[in-house]
Image (cartoon, rainbow, N blue to C red):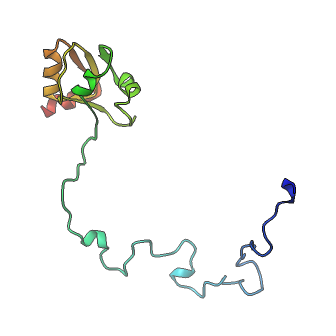
Amino acid sequence: MKLHDLQPAPGSRRNRKRVGRGPGGTDKTAGRGHKGQKSRSGAGKGLFFEGGRSTLISRLPKRGFNNVGTTYEVVNLSQLSALEGDSFDRAALEQAGLVRRKNRPVKLLGSGELSRAVTVRVDAASASAIRAVEAAGGRVELNQAQAGETEKAE
């Protein structure tokens, strides 16, 4: 047997029914009946239609906190202390695997200890993180686009 000899088992494959293509049973209305919403192309009520009443999701109680603010990629001081080097920017943090999503800004948080002087260039930083880095002899540089927002928040 060769590659060109392969074919499906007899009767296992059928041609699709081409409706609305002239006389022969499925012409004219193409099996959709006359008029009405279901006879129109692209018509239908949608996946979650419930006969006109409020949908289930809108009837359920809403709980918890829905954050509509900026979502940051978070880097902690403890993660920085485990890395080699004395200068960190977004590229270095991505290479180390601490930052994954490219469309999110990076924020430095003060969780953990830092024992050496490092320079960190991020989009935002918490006040405790800035204090800890400066206490270790380093500095935190905030990117200009986000720096104003961080200072207003503190």
Residue 117 vs residue 89, the one in the foreground:
117
Task: From this view, report whether residue 52 is shown above or below residue 130.
Answer: below
Task: From this view, report whether residue 1 is shown above or below residue 92.
Answer: below
Residue 38 vs residue 131, the one in the foreground:
131
Task: From this view, report whether residue 8 is shown above or below residue 83.
Answer: below
* Residue 59, horizontal then vertical, whole percent: 25, 72
The image quadrant where one finds the N terminus is bottom right
Question: Image point 77% across, 86% down: which residue?
Answer: 24
Q: Does residue 143 appear in this view?
A: no
* 33 horizontally vs 123: left or right: right
Labels in figure, total: 0
* Residue 135, horizontal then vertical, whole percent: 13, 15
Q: Does residue 113 appear in this view?
A: yes
* Residue 89, horizontal then vertical, whole percent: 33, 21
Question: Image point 28% across, 25% down: which residue?
Answer: 122
**Among the 4 quarters of the image, the one containing residue 53:** bottom left
The residue lying furthest to the front in this view is 1
Task: From this view, report whether residue 55 is shown above or below residue 105.
Answer: below
The image quadrant where one finds the C terminus is top left
Question: Image point 27% across, 23% down: which residue?
Answer: 80
* 136 horizontally vs 94: left or right: left
**Among the 4 quarters of the image, the one containing residue 56:** bottom left
Residue 94 vs residue 81, the one in the foreground:
81
Question: Image point 37% across, 81% down: which residue?
Answer: 51
* Residue 45, horizontal then vertical, whole percent: 45, 75
